[in-house]
Amino acid sequence: MTIKTKSKKIWDTEQKTAMNKENKTILEVGEIRINNIDFGKITEIRDDLLLINYEELRNVILEDKNIKDVDIKIARPGESKRIIPIKDVIEPRAKVLGKGNIFPGFIGISETVGRGTTHVLDGVAVITSGRIVNFQEGLIDMSGPGAQYTPWSKTYNVVLVCTPVDGLGKHEHEKAIRLAGLRASYYLGQVGRKANPTKKESYEYNPFPANNKPYLNLPRVAFVHMLLSQGLLHDTYVYGVDAKRMLPTIISPTELMDGAIVSGNCAAPCHKHTTYHQLNNPIVEELYKRHKKDLYFVGVVLVNESTSLSSVELASSYALNLVKLMNVRGVIISEDGGGNPETILMMICKKCEESGIKTVLVTDEYAGRDGSSQGLADVTPEADAVITNGNGNQLVILPPMDEVIGDIKTIEIITGGHDGSLKPDGSIEMEIAGIMGSTCELGYSNLTTRLR
């Protein structure tokens, strides 16, 4: 089956229908709760059950001639299953009304998004796996102690176990797996177009309202969203554009919800921002909850992360110019990745604080297995409000699972694992750095701080 995107006639009709939402710059997100998945004769939703036509979805993936074969597995919460290695996690969504398609720049009409109506298959995740692309990939346990560290032990997962064609280079391999995940998510998302959402939320984006009098006393706050963009398979895409080719830019938070940002990352699994994270950014969601109540959320500044000092200086200064333009009192800055990105994290913090703009930083740590080492590669005195989402070096023992989806032997080469990680009985000794999303620097994780 070829993925069909909207014809121009249908697209124009939907624009007229969605005009009210368009003029008000509103995105309505309808969540269709899914509480089970299985294979069936046709891909459809029955009540809260998602049925998937195996061969049809498989044919969608095999349209890419760089994919030689693909097997599709299902992993449900509580099952004795281990998925390894994992490249990306994506949530199925579909544009119902409004411009463009989900994942613009990769699928369908190249048009800006973030307005109209979008439907979400809530509780479902597409996971890309198969032959390892790069050593910085991870695992998900659907049960046992490892399940506590990852949010995707609680989702109904469609796992694509992809085999690339022989001789495919790493960058082409990454691209093929990335597109496989997006195409599968788009395909599954289409069944939600006509479904009745179990929950609806509306998100308005209006950073400079004509009548701002009711909100003049509220502090204006922006989110500075750092994107891993260092090359060497550490890449993020904005409307299909490699972020390392960008200057920092302002973007509507609703565009994130429509797939404007896509992960191309092969970074440490514990803290890399998957495409699922970009669609469900908890910092954006929390700022919206407080919008027009105790703060005014003015939007998102995207900042790419470079490997050269001169580029880091430029990006941090340009980001400062943008938040000044937005006339904010405070910013939340999230890191993406670790090590080198901490330099630009601290530079943005320092320059904002020196300009009178208050900052809160969101990151994680690599503080050694006993937690006594320096957690960050760079610091600055101005960084006096820092949230940590955990220590990637924390050691865990994971018991064997009844089924392994993928290749268990990769545990000894992925981040968090080591030679000898895999024990004869199938159990694993590893650092939580190898568990997908365990210390997510957006806060989409399960670790918390408790007083003893």
Image (cartoon, grey):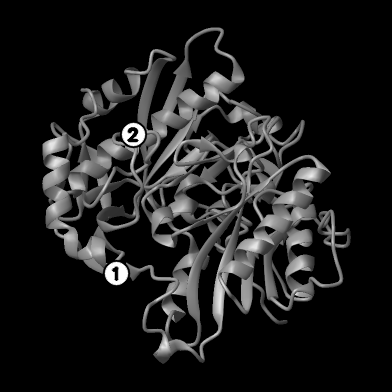
The label number, if any, that marks residue 359 in the structure image: none
Please say if 129 is above or below 429: above
Q: Nearer the viewer, residue 211 or 126?
A: 211
- x and y percentages locating residue 92 in the rendered image: 32, 45
Spot occupied by residue 336 in the image (x, y as percentages of width and height): 64, 51
Which amino acid does the dot numbered 2 rest on? Ile
User: How many neighbours does mark 2 have within 10 angstroms: few (below 14), some (14-19), or many (20 or more)?
Assistant: some
Residue 182 lies left or right of residue 35; in this view the side is right
Q: Nearer the viewer, residue 78 or 347?
A: 347
Classify the position of the C terminus by image quarter.
bottom right
Q: Earlier in the sequence, mark 1 or mark 2?
A: 2
- Residue 202, numbered circle: 1
* Residue at point 57%, 52% (across, down): 437
Could you give the CA–CA distance between mark 1 and mark 2, rounded to whole angstroms? 24 Å
Towards the viewer: 429 or 130? 130
Image quadrant in which the N terminus is located:
top left
The crowding category of the residue bearing disc 1, from other C-alpha atoms within 10 Å (few below 14, some 14 to 19, many at least 20), is some
- Percent across and percent down for residue 401 are 51, 40
Residue 107 is tagged as: 2
Q: Is residue 145 left or right of residue 319?
A: left
Residue 73 visible within the image? yes
